Image: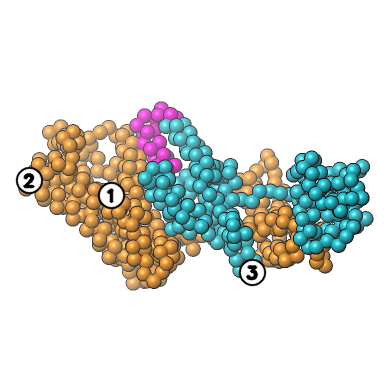
Chain colours: A orange, B cyan
Amino acid sequence: MSAVKQTQFINKNQQLWQDFEQWLDYQALSRWAKNSKKNPVEKPVDIDLPHAYRQICHHFALANSRMYSPILVERLNKLVVRGHQTLYSTRTHIMRDIMHYFSGGFPSLVRKEWKVVAIAAALFYVPFIAIIIAIQINPDIAYSIMDGDQLRSVEEMYDPDLHERLGRERESDSDVLMFGHYIKNNTGIGFQVFAGGMLYGIGTLFFTLFNGIFIGAVFGHLTHLGYIDTLYGFVVGHGSLELNAIVLSAAAGLMLARALIMPGRKSRKRALIDDGKSAVTMMYGVATMFILAAFIEAFWSSMVMPVMIKYVVGAILWTLVGVYFWFVGRGTNSDQIDTKASSNSGTFSP
Amino acid sequence: MALDTLYHVNTPEGISLRLSPAGPVPRMLAWMIDIMIRVGINTVVFTALAFLGKTGLGIALIISFLMEWFYPVYFELYKNGQTPGKKSFNLYVTMENASPVTPAASMIRNLLRFVDFLPFLYGFGLISMLLTKRFQRLGDLVANTVVLHKPLEYPIVSNTKDDNENSITPVAPPLALQLAEQQALIRFHQRNAYLTEERATELSLLTGKLIEDDKQQPTKRLLGIASWIMGDRK
């Protein structure tokens, strides 16, 4: 045994350990519990966290090298872990980070990953448009993609004869219902498209192609029937966000796949961690786009109004989305944001 | 040390933290508790909001969407990495270097939960956990997180619980003890509070020479020697 016996060591430092523990407990309380009048919490002794933490680290190291009892070592280990967690926790400026993200981080991340985004766009839009065209030439193709019941129900939704006026096909109180439905359904699909990238991209590939073909079949079939204004008038507004959000979630999924398939000079795990950070940074924007799209779809697309207005607003929205991803965040300090976004998990965490 | 799943993280202060990752079984049980809580909340929300008609149903759908994807994120970020299920099994989520889980990491590991769940009931997640040293599912690998056991509380029990007649007098050991032997005695002293009396006696009787002088109360004798080693003198 060493010069200082365990009991003396404990007696000497017990107070500091207790103060430290109490201080941590107090910090862990919610603001509400701290100010609660019913069960007032006593404010513990103020400690100098970095100093106290280093001292306890020192005690822990001493206790280890002097081979004090495992229970004491365990207790100090626990204190050190808690101190470590508190001292090295990250402090974020959420509002500022969000501002930064949408005013530059998100669009410049999309531009930086333009190759992946282009592939994702091709995966979705090429089958989508190809199927629409193919159905104009040979309408039967629609029936080999969807069954008769599905097509009939889609027809009913957009049949101009069934709706006296264009637009609102449902009661207004169902707007909120549809809002909830679109959020749950569409955003969920976006998340699945992204997560599918972890299966070497197969999941992303499958969901993106499937959605492109399926939506293409609906559009092709209805176009062939001539339900132009009911369909495109309804879809053009929110489509600008929704369709491109699917493309971007596919891009985020492909970024994971890229890390798995061609990690480059990093280990696969390192590549996954790094690319995962920028991919999830992209998903913040994607989720926002899905929610905005759901909002437009539920409350604007379903409104009754001349179809020209729908087309004009739709055109404006598509232009805005294009301008946003093409121009916003360029020049000023976009490059910095760019690298920060990829190397540093982006803006939501420092 | 190498036999179990513990691993060490070096901090900037030059010490190494000892961490123990949690395996599939406690995590699965914790998940089952969480899923029951989520189903419970969903049921309540849908029944309560059903009175508001379609609007209520819409709100309920939004809530269930949030519950599906962000329930763990909320708890990981604001409740020290512990969902209620994890809390009940003394588990918590941290970054691999034992610093608190970051928002981005929490988002990643919970969005990727979807692939871990494939092909059914966390199949890929389980395979990944069995193939990695620290029981990481796919989401953990990308997010660089681990799920750890929180060390159990073993408060240092002072053996003064029986102050008067049974109080322990420090005794010098009858022969010189080696370091490992001294440590074993200290360990015994501290674990004593968690042992039954019979077991303690049984263990003490194994020490032969040490207790020869006091065969009547071997435990007490041994505790006396232990507290002498730890520096108690009376």
Q: Mark 3–mark 2 contact, CB under 8 Å?
A: no
Looking at the rendered image, the quarter that the N terminus of chain A falls into is bottom right
Q: Which residue is mark 3?
A: B14
* Alpha carbons under labels 3 and 2: distance apart: 72 Å
- The answer to whether residue A57 shows anywhere in this view is yes
Residue type, mark 1 in image? Phe
Q: Which residue is mark 2?
A: A138
Could you say which is closer to the camera, residue A338 or residue A18?
A: A18
Q: Position of residue A271 (x, y in %)?
A: 40, 65
Query: Residue at position x 10%, y 49% from top?
Result: A134
Does the magenta segment cover residue B67? yes
Q: Element type at marker 1? A: helix
* A160 vs A317: above or below: above
From the viewer's perspective, tell me whether residue B123 is left or right of residue B30.
left
Query: Residue at position x 27%, y 54% from top?
Result: A205
Residue type, mark 3 in image? Gly
- The span picked out in magenta is B47-68
Labels 2 and 1: the sequence-earlier one: 2
Q: Position of residue B213 (x, y in %)?
A: 92, 50
Q: Element type at marker 3? A: loop
Could you say which is closer to the camera, residue A72 or residue A105?
A: A72
* Alpha carbons under labels 1 and 3: distance apart: 48 Å
Instruction: State whether discs 3 and 2 lie on one chain.
Output: no
Q: Position of residue A316 (x, y in %)?
A: 23, 55
**Dot 2 falls on which chain?**
A
Q: Which residue is mark 1?
A: A207
Crowdedness of circle 2 by 10 Å Cα count: few (<14), some, many (20+)? few
Crowdedness of circle 3 by 10 Å Cα count: few (<14), some, many (20+)? few
